[in-house]
Amino acid sequence: MNRTDNQMMISGSIPGKIIAFMIPIALSNLFQQLYNAVDSMIVGNFVGSSALAAVSSSGNLIFMIVGFFNGIAIGAGVVIARYLGAKDSTSTETAVHTTVALGLVFSVLMTIIGMVFVPPLLRLMGTPASVLPQSISYLRIYFAGSVGFVMYNVFVGILQAAGDSEHPLIYLVISSGINLVMDLLLVAVFHFGVAGAAFATVMSQVVSALLCMNLLMRVDADYRLRWSRVRLQKDMTLRIIRYGIPSGVQNSIMSLSNVVIQSYINSYGEAAVAGIGAYTKVEGFCFIPVSSFAMAITTFVSQNLGAGEYERARKGVRFSAIATIVSAQTLGLLLFTFRYPLIGLFDSNPAVIQFGADRARFTCLAFFLCAFTHFFAAVMRGAGKPLIPMFVFMFCWCLVRVLILTIADLFVHTVTTTYLVYPITWTISTITLAICYRRLDLRKARL
């Protein structure tokens, strides 16, 4: 049995396979959050609240644009994992090389979209005038390096579809170290401000992508990358897009709703933008188990359905659901308890800290609802039903949120509304996806 066979999750202990696959993903997500947080902490402490607000206000816009293209990578991973589970070598190779070709196309599109539309989008969001120039500078540098983060996500998606979550972790640790060193040099030493933080992030992502690419070119398996075979094969392209676009739309919808909420937050001034932005950095750490189990269960379900192991897939879902929800809520309680000192790591301004702490007070106790929603959306994707979570997120996390904020703002203009909208919509999406999952027949899940 070769290494590729050992990485597959279609046999062996279900908890053992899932946890062994999930832990490197969790550590990867931890380092991802760390170097995002490092950007904010270094900028906030060495440049000031205005610069921190610029980086914070840029985050939701980045996730909205990047999220769509990352969704394509998620859809490609589902297709590749299903073919690997079915041991279909020809289709696996075609899917891998079509995915890489799509990544290159999207890298170009991302650069163009980011460079051209950043200023009007920031203005549309009502970004404070004191923050706007730095936000534009940060985002333009970030999107100029689109090929780095797009191809990194494409390559990681291929590796994780094959059950390899260890190498992406190693490469991310390396790039995180590069990001930290460059952040300190460019921001703290050479005083390049938010432009230095953006450049450090771009370069670290390019290094990660190159390391993943090198591994894929050397691996002795069906998913090996051969550049001479990279092309857009029509049928496979349409299949990947069919699964990827709903995931991309779902990611963008989540980010779009956050962009809308950010526009309301912007109206409360620089301290609100910086404080709530700092909170979201801390919150990201609490959702590491959620995103990690979600990635793991998508691959687990897809591989096992490809192999015809339907009951094994259901057992994996049950185990992972409990683990995800319990771990997320435990971290939520810790964040609720230590919210003031944690927000204070980013900025010592009492007003900034209070805004972040208030956001934590309203959302942390409902983390289990958000965990449930993300987890079962991932199950649906792995089962080849990406349209279900797409429509759920479109309705609950976009339409309902916008309606609540719009109607509430007619009667009372308070930042508390932007806090309450999260647990309300998490509750609605949890109930909806629970009903959808109970009606899902995994035996009829086909590519």
Image (tube, helix red, strand yellow):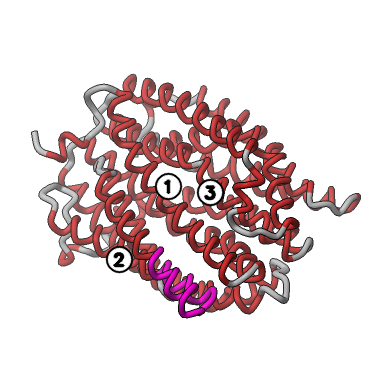
Q: Secondary structure at mark 1?
A: helix
Quadrant (top left, top right, bottom left, bottom right) of the C terminus = top left
Residue 260 in percent (x, y) is at 69, 57
Q: Quadrant of residue 310?
A: top left
Tag of residue 207: 2
Amino acid type shown at disc 3: Gln
Q: Residues within 10 Å of mark 1 (few under 14, many from 20)?
A: many
Q: Is residue 235 visible?
A: no
- Amino acid type of the residue that numbered disc 2 sits on in the rendered structure: Val
Q: Is residue 132 above or below residue 79?
A: below
User: Mark 3 — residue?
Assistant: 250
Task: Work out how far the residue at label 2 is from the one at label 3, CA to CA, in angstroms.
Answer: 28 Å
Instruction: Say whether marks 1 and 3 touch (CB < 8 Å).
Output: no
**Residue 167 drawn above or below residue 198:** above
Answer few, some or many: residues within 10 Å of disc 2's Cα (few below 14, many 20 plus, some between 14 and 19): many
- Tell me the distance, in whole angstroms, between the alpha carbons under discs 2 and 1: 18 Å
Mark 2 or mark 1, earlier in chain = 1
Where are the magenta residues, as a range?
180-202
Front of the two marks 2 and 3: 2
Task: Pick the residue in front: 382 or 440.
Answer: 382
- SS of the residue at dot 3? helix
Question: In the image, which is nearer the foreground, mark 2 or mark 1?
Answer: 1
* Neighbourhood count class around disc 3 (C-alpha, 10 Å): few under 14, some 14–19, many 20 upward: many
> What's the residue type where badge 1 is placed?
Leu
In the rendered image, which quarter contains the N terminus?
top left
Q: Name the residue tied to disc 1.
A: 30
User: Which callout, 1 or 3, points to the residue nearer the camera?
Assistant: 1
Relative image position of residue 299 (x, y in whole percent): 33, 38
